[in-house]
Image (tube, rainbow, N blue to C red):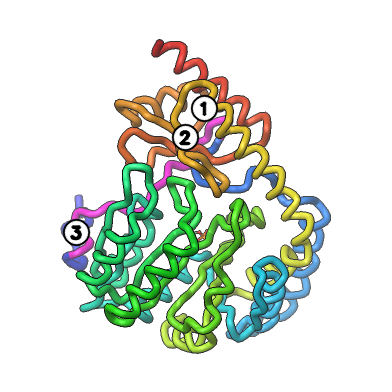
Amino acid sequence: MTGIDDLPVRDELRGKSPYGAPQLDVPVRLNTNENPYPLPEPLVERIAERVREAARDLNRYPDRDAVELRTELAKYLTKTGNHRVGMENVWAANGSNEVIQQLLQTFGGPGRKAIGFEPSYSMHALIARGTGTAWISAPRNEDFTIDRAAAERAIAENRPDVVFITTPNNPTGNAVPRETVLALYEAAQAAKPSMVVVDEAYIEFSHGDSLLPLIEDRPNLVVSRTMSKAFGAAGLRLGYLAAHPAVVDAVQLVRLPYHLSAVAQATALAALEHTDTLLQYVEQLKAERDRLVTELRAIGYEVTESDANFVQFGRFEDSHTTWQKILDRGVLVRDNGVPGWLRVSTGTPAENDAFLDAVRELKKEQS
Ligand code: PMP
């Protein structure tokens, strides 16, 4: 039987595995940091209306520059980010994964390097590989914070072209202090200069503020965002960035023409009309996230401080066996390969109760 290795695939892809969070059919799925609440019915209706309108023009290619959508995203950022941004600062793509891919295609690529502080979002390294960008993994501290001096040294020594800072970080949940981001930006400019990508996929769940205002006077800083988490629209595939208008111009060099379908643009615009309602779910999820942290600690687990819609908990001698035991109780959490730790996404109160019951039982079994 012909397998991948029998094909003339690029050398750097040989023997590698694709991104693959299990998609299992179990009662409680808390493994991919989705929003557990389905979209409210009035929004579903509005999407249907907007998509019906868009359907009348589907014989034509969509707005290649997604002007209306970028304008509405800019308004959302201005309203929530303590900083005025315009359409010219914003770019959108099919999920922030595609935003990151476009950034690496533009600023990384063969002969270039990107650095990340790991454990962090595994797709940064995978997209680097896919775009032929060399990946440098710099370690975090034992408690998953970034050691500022060590990170500055890693940047000075490696002189990367792209620096990824995920805040709040996935899978650990903790945020990176503003001063650290500023220091790493300065280190990156002194070393190369390079682009600094602040991945804020989970920022709406944070106790702190977005770093969006930092794009002012820093043309090499990019803030990446998504509608997959706070807007509860992971199925929509809509990510975006905010940066200096020159960055928006630069990514045009690699974006595929008409990459955002008219249906996606219409759906995202409908969701943005319902921002206030959707952000109320975020408040509920933040309260549930805090409850998970408190209860897990009360049961006797270690928990990493969380500014996201998920919680990293441990420690386990064998996290994979524990993952399986939790799954056997009908709850799917995530084993991200961080030794000793697992990650649970915040669900509905009932889902969180089911998860807490499962891990409480496990704790009793072990003691
Ligand atoms: N960044 C981070 C840190 C993430 O955790 C994720 C999704 N898990 C993404 C980006 C990508 O999200 P999407 O492509 O759905 O926007």
Residue designated by label 1: 297
Label 2 to label 1: alpha-carbon separation: 7 Å
Residue range highlighted in magenta: 12-28
At x 28%, y 81%, the residue is 192
Residue type, numbered disc 2: Val
Precedes in sequence: disc 1 or disc 3: 3
For mark 1, give the secondary structure.
helix
For mark 2, give the secondary structure.
strand
Residue designated by label 2: 303
Residue designated by label 3: 14
Other-residue count near label 1 (Cα within 10 Å), few / some / many at <14 / 14–19 / ≥20: some
- State the image coordinates of residue 311 (x, y, percent, origin top left): 51, 40
- State the image coordinates of residue 164 (x, y, percent, origin top left): 38, 65
For mark 3, give the secondary structure.
loop
Other-residue count near label 3 (Cα within 10 Å), few / some / many at <14 / 14–19 / ≥20: few
At x 22%, y 57%, the residue is 4
Camera-side residue of 324 and 366: 366
Whether tag 1 and tag 3 are in contact, CB under 8 A, the answer is no
Above or below — where is 144 with respect to 255? Answer: above
Whether tag 2 and tag 1 are in contact, CB under 8 A, the answer is yes
At x 37%, y 75%, the residue is 186
Label 2 to label 3: alpha-carbon separation: 37 Å
Camera-side residue of 42 and 292: 292
- State the image coordinates of residue 161 (x, y, percent, origin top left): 30, 76
The mark closer to the camera, 2 or 3, is 2
Instruction: Find out whether residue 19 is within the magenta segment.
Output: yes
* Viewport quadrant of the C terminus: top left
Q: What numbered label is drawn on residue 20?
A: none
Residue type, numbered disc 3: Arg
